[in-house]
Image: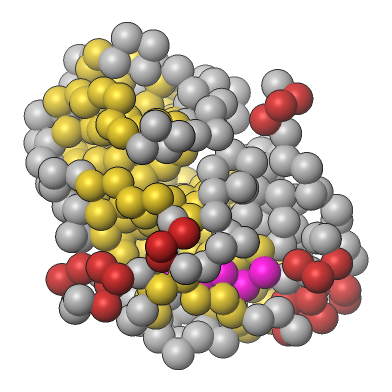
Amino acid sequence: MSSNSPAHRRHVLRSKFVDLIAGAKHQLYSDPAVRRGPGHSLRTLAWSPLGNLIATGSLDRTIRIWNPEKPLARQATELQSEGTVEKVDWRPNKEAELVSVGSDGLARFWDVRAKSCINKVKVGGEAFTVAWMHDGETVLVGRKDDVLVPIDVKTYTAGAPLPQDIQTNQAYFSHSGEHLLLSTGSGRVKICSWPDMNIIHSLNGHTSACYALQMSPRGDYIAVGGSDAMISLWDTRDFVCKHALSRMVGPVRSVSFSWDGSYIVGGSDEGLGIEIIHAASGEYVQTVPTANPAPVVAWHPSRYWLAYTGDPYGMKIVAAGQNLGL
């Protein structure tokens, strides 16, 4: 859909990219909720499909919608949930709609333009993950008791729960929507056919629980972050582990590919600095300095802009190449 295509996609050479990142400033988006103490920390962030907006969610039930060009809290839109916000994610085919889940057992669907919750769906337990199919018609909610709940967004109805026989930490749909990837407590990633949930392959590359996973924009790699402080990078043609990346200090809580799939980062609640890795070679190309651990990291969908949590005052964004229109 052409109206949903990001407009700023300009690839730069690796040498140029390193210079852009090194010279980029860190913009703070100061959140009043975070300043009230550790019980109000940011749990999640997500870019909108076009990257015009970025959402954050915190333990104090606040969802804040930011324009990345406007860092002041009074310029952001505040949405109030009725439970702690564990995860927010935007509907892939709608720039102004998102879903949030948390402790109250509800999936809430929001219209940012109307600044309101347009629907609620009961998922039957505490929820902490969401995974959208890329057509935006189905979202899969993950509960803390290892049950997955599919929701038909056309009718806002929950389908039959899908209990898992193992700790399940994150779900991710392939770009085609034909496969579902599940990170598990055993250290492997299950690749299942969708919607019948037959296991067709497993990625076994970690010595303990896998937490985070993401497929690259071109679909050629899968990145997996584990509690063993490693990121494994898998080739989707033959499901071979191409790189085992071991510079992380603590458990990898999030992973994110840049819009062109060239670079990957991982987030952790231990250690300082965000390491940027060149996906094809597995080489470390740059470290983004941080004063605190950054557990949640996310690249912009069409720019070399990197958002991260962990600062005691709110979210930060490193906008590489902003002055050049990149």
The image position of residue 194, as x and y in percent, is: 43, 19
From this view, report whether residue 222 is shown above or below residue 73: above
Q: In this image, 187 relative to 5: left or right?
A: left
Of residues 247 and 290, the one nearer the viewer is 290
Q: How is the image coloured?
A: secondary structure
Q: In this image, 38 relative to 270: left or right?
A: left
Please report the residue visible at 45 percent of the width from the left and 18 percent of the height from the top.
137
63 in the magenta segment: no
The image position of residue 296, as x and y in percent, is: 42, 64
Q: Residue 263, can we see it?
A: no
Q: Of helix, strand and loop, which mostly describes the magenta segment?
A: strand
Of residues 124 and 57, the one nearer the viewer is 57
Please report the residue visible at 59 percent of the width from the left and 30 percent of the height from the top.
175
The image position of residue 78, as x and y in percent, is: 33, 51
What is the residue that sits farthest to the top in this orientation?
155
From this view, report whether residue 310 is shown above or below residue 170: below
Range of the magenta residues?
A: 315-319
| Number of marks drawn | 0
Please report the residue visible at 45 percent of the width from the left and 90 percent of the height from the top.
291
Residue 233, located in which quarter of the rendered image? Answer: bottom right
> Quadrant location of the C terminus?
bottom right
Residue 250, located in which quarter of the rendered image? Answer: bottom left
From this view, report whether residue 217 is shown above or below residue 1: below
Of residues 29 and 254, the one nearer the viewer is 29
Q: In this image, 110 relative to 235: left or right?
A: left
Please report the residue visible at 50 percent of the width from the left and 85 percent of the height from the top.
290
What is the residue that sits farthest to the bottom in this orientation?
291
Q: Residue 160, can we see it?
A: yes
